[in-house]
Image: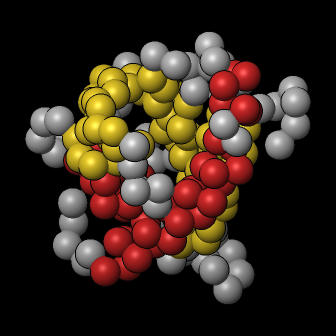
Amino acid sequence: MSANNKQVSATRVIAADAQRIFDVIADPTLHHVIDGSGSVQGAKGESRKLALGDKFSTNMRIVVPYRISNKVVEYAEGRLIAWAHAGGWRWRYELEPITEGADAGSTLVTETFDWSTSKFGSYVEITKSPAKNLKSMESTLARLDAFVENTSSPL
């Protein structure tokens, strides 16, 4: 993390095809399943694959329940998806297929909490959200790995 870069990232190699992983991340109804923070409680609406510009809402709970609306602001099919809410910070997933070596056929997955576009950057830092979110992202990637590994049917 740097002052100019205002983001933290967690990375994990997952033994699955990048598109399969992307399809899980791009379905907001699965966010509560893979969320490592325990704050995502579910998504409004039916299972669907998000695309650039799509909006979705999730039920959240951090001390008290609330709903938050998000918009997909970055998108490259099978490789990148990021969404932001009214506060301006982004959650980004980048997927890089591994084609050589012992992990060939796996995917390097990076989740990033980016508050460089936040309207409340000072709040993010005062509440120590970057450090808390880093721990949660590591847990999210572990849950994503387990979900993909243990769900053999196509989504």
**With respect to residue 16, does 102 lie above or below?**
below
Q: Which one is in front, 117 or 38?
A: 38
Q: Residue at x 31, y 80 (%)?
A: 150
Q: Residue at x 56, y 40 (%)?
A: 92
Instruction: For residue 52, say whether it is visible.
Output: no
Q: Which one is in front, 89 or 50?
A: 89
Residue 104 image point, x, y percent: 61, 77
Q: Which one is in front, 59 or 34?
A: 59
The colouring scheme, among rainbow, by chain, secondary structure or one colour, is secondary structure
Residue 34 image point, x, y percent: 38, 60
Residue extending farthest right: 3
2 to the left or right of 19: right
Q: Residue at x 28, y 30 (%)?
A: 67
131 to the left or right of 37: right
Q: Which one is in front, 44 or 71?
A: 44
Snapshot quadrant of residue 28 = top left
**With respect to residue 37, does 54 lie above or below?**
above
Q: Quadrant of the C terminus?
A: bottom left
Residue 1 image point, x, y percent: 83, 43
**With respect to residue 87, does 1 lie above or below?**
below
**With respect to residue 96, does 123 lie above or below?**
above
Snapshot quadrant of residue 7 = top right
